[in-house]
Image (tube, rainbow, N blue to C red):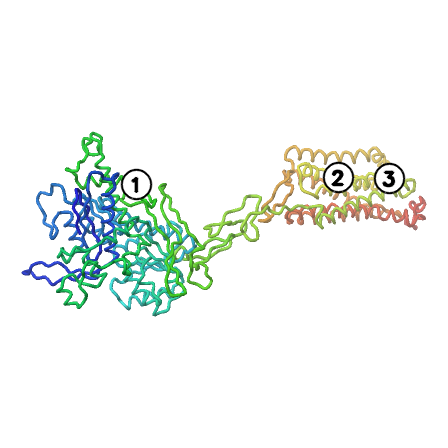
Amino acid sequence: MHKPGDVILGGLFEVHYTSVFPEQTFTSKPQQPICKGFDTLGFRHAMTMAFAIDEINKNSNLLPNMTLGYSIYDNCGALVVGFSGALSLASGQENQFQLQQNCSGTPPVLGIVGDHYSTFSIAIANVLGLYKMPLVSYFATCSCLSDRQRFPTFFRTIPSDAFQVRAMIQILKHFGWTWVGLLVSDDDYGRHVAQSFQSDLPKSGGGCLAYLEVLPWDSNPSELKRIVHLIKKSTARVVIVFAHEIHMIQLMEEVARQNVTGRQWIASETWTLASVLQTSELMPYLSGTLGIAIRRGDIPGLREFLFQINPDQNDNNKNNMVRQFWEHTFQCKFDPADWIETEGALCTAEEDITHIETEFLDLSNLRPEYNVYKAVYSLAHALDDLLHCESGRGPFRGHSCATLQTLEPWQLVHYLQKVNFTTSFGDHVSFDENGDALPIYDVMNWLWLPDGRTNVQNVGEVKRSISGSEELTLDEYKIVWNSKSKEPPRSVCSENCPPGTRISRKKGQPECCFSCIPCSNGKITNNTNSLECISCPEDFWSSPQRDHCIPKITEFLSYQEPLGICLTSTSLLGTFICAVVLGIFTYHRRTPIVRANNSELSFLLLVSLKLCFLCSLLFIGRPRLWTCQLRHAAFGISFVLCVSCILVKTMVVLAVFKSSKPGGGANLKWFGAMQQRGTVLVFTFIQAAICTAWLVSSSPTPYKNTQYYDDKIVYECVVGSTIGFAVLMGYIGLLATLSFLLAFLVRNLPNNFNEAKLITFSMLIFCAVWVAFVPAYINSPGKYADAVEVFAILASSFGLLLALFGPKCYLILMRPDKNTRKAIMGHTTTKS
């Protein structure tokens, strides 16, 4: 098809989808291939270019005072035919291309719209790049064509497969499909898609490929059986197919034979709208298919333009596209010879195209046509910008501008790169540095209706904004799924690891296949599919579910827990008993048994025992600085006061015993009341000095111990100086040992009431308790160490109280007849 004009734009379209090449010999004249199989939609693409040029010529605002023409060639579905047409357009030779030594001069064509296939466009763009002639494709999607080094003059109004791949990855991520299969055709289109998927899918975190298979270019039954069997056995429920219609037909026929159901098919733009697949035999398997489709657009006035198409009866050229379209549509022939041969009707050119059903006039779904429309307008806007160049401000050498008479294709390439306009449908058109238009796709869904028809409905779009971000918009309530649940299928290799677990990769398996390992104690994850567990802060611990950190349990000897209540009650009981005994002794202070052996020391001993019981309370409750400092000081001084009283009482008993012997009366002068008080005071002062030195040099402090338990904080008092604590305890032990030895020496005094025996027994209990205390204290963790110490204090205090004052209280209360001077000082038999 040709139309004259001041500037000619070329076009390459697939008006026929197959070619027959006659046999050639070296001696015979070269013959053109015969094009067969008229493609109505391909012809509509070509007519859309003719309409766009006609509309531009009528537009006074775009390319005024200038007429655009066109020269459109049919590639007949064969690379050699399309390549020949491209060379004819570039060189000006309609039938053949001859290489000239001088390639200068203005070419008859400044730009070409086409071609349909990626493989054809690759070959043609390689050659047109030498001419620096722009080629604007409306359907070639191979991402390889974005290589500006190889294809410096290639542009396209359809998104590249690289974006189509990313668009599909967006859909996969939206529905959580991380385990998918990929089938591609065995050509440039399929191979580059496979490379893009293998590189982009892991980077996006969108998932993994369960398998990648290449569909055979020719129908290979055994290979198709193997691929379909793999689909059937795979756990991947989502299958993405980048292939042409013929390959999908062959594949789905095998899918139907093996009855592979329960698969969610994802269609590339090449077969998303393929009506040949929407049959009653295949729709049980393809219903619910999601696909990426070329952006649909409205082209006002196109219908009226197509209605005006009418062949010229005077044109005897059988290769005329309009004439072939008319014969194909009305099943008639213009040439009587052809009419007789085919026994068909004779075309009159008076047939009414409005009264015949043809998809040629179904303009409800203009997609490739919309890209053709944008391609023509891109060239027109570039040409308009070029012709509006202001002299002296041009982009070329010396700031020059191009003129219509000196126009070169490479100058049009410069302006085409800067094209920026908006279509009447509202879509923005511009090209990036690789010649790719601002990408946008429609998302389609196949709905199988009860009456057997198929409705391919638009359920969303995916596009790249001017800022560069990719945006997916879906109307999920519109989507129909091919499942009984009417819910999106689940396609994962491994289920998500819930919070509290981490991913453990399986060796030799894709990243999407993993195991979920629970986090160890003290570590958590609060997100799904975490790669590692994070440790909780110092004072926190992991929850039982390992999904968040909780404050650690604090442990100390508390007043609220049973052990603390028992020890507190026992301490108060001992204090109360001491008070009762003190009251008894006070009431009976004038009786011989109270007055015997310095009653003042007995009262002081009861007070010190009372302090011993009370100091145990400092070990209960949360440790504070003042309790840590006071507890051992109070304990040490109280017990030294107690043991000092016992030691002085023992020394007095020993002095009395020695004074009963001849010449021993002088010993008593060293053990008067003042000397006894002074001795107790000195012994106690020494312990006070030890405590003061300890507190000043290295004071006990509260400490949060996390060594005993991982999930608990044990509050305890560290002694600060171990030497100070050892000296304090050693001093008490020294006095207790000395008291025990002295009491043991005088245990056989010849009195009816021998207090030395009671002292001996009490000190034996005291020493036994504290000897047992040391290993128990060392091996008890946390609060149990405090409990052991409190128990030792209470046990030794009760031992002293009961052993020393129990028998005396019994005599005072139960045997008052024994509480007389005569009974106490009475002599026994002849021995005394």
Element marked by disc 3: helix
Element marked by disc 2: helix
- Residue pictured at 11% horizontal, 43% vertical: 103
- Front residue (pair 620, 487): 487
**Disc 2/disc 3 C-alpha distance (Å):** 19 Å
- Disc 1 marks which residue? 421
Mark 2 or mark 1: name the one nearer the start of the chain.
1
Residue 771, percent from left and from top = 70, 48
Extreme residue toward the front, this view:
350
Labelled pair 2, 1 in contact (Cβ < 8 Å): no
Q: Is residue 610 visible?
A: yes
Extreme residue toward the top, this view:
392
**In front of the other: label 2 or label 1?**
1
Quarter of the image holding residue 449? bottom left
- Residue pictured at 12% horizontal, 51% vertical: 94
- Front residue (pair 436, 506): 436
Amino acid at the residue labelled 1: Phe
- Front residue (pair 326, 154): 326
Element marked by disc 1: strand
Q: Which mark is residue 640?
A: 2
Q: Which mark is residue 599?
A: 3
Q: Residues within 10 Å of mark 2 (few under 14, many from 20)?
A: many
Mark 3 or mark 1: name the one nearer the start of the chain.
1
Amino acid at the residue labelled 3: Ser
- Residue pictured at 42% horizontal, 59% vertical: 480
Q: Is residue 604 left or right of residue 540?
A: right
Amino acid at the residue labelled 2: Val
Figure check: 701 above or below 269: above
Q: Is residue 812 left or right of residue 96?
A: right
Extreme residue toward the bottom, this view:
257
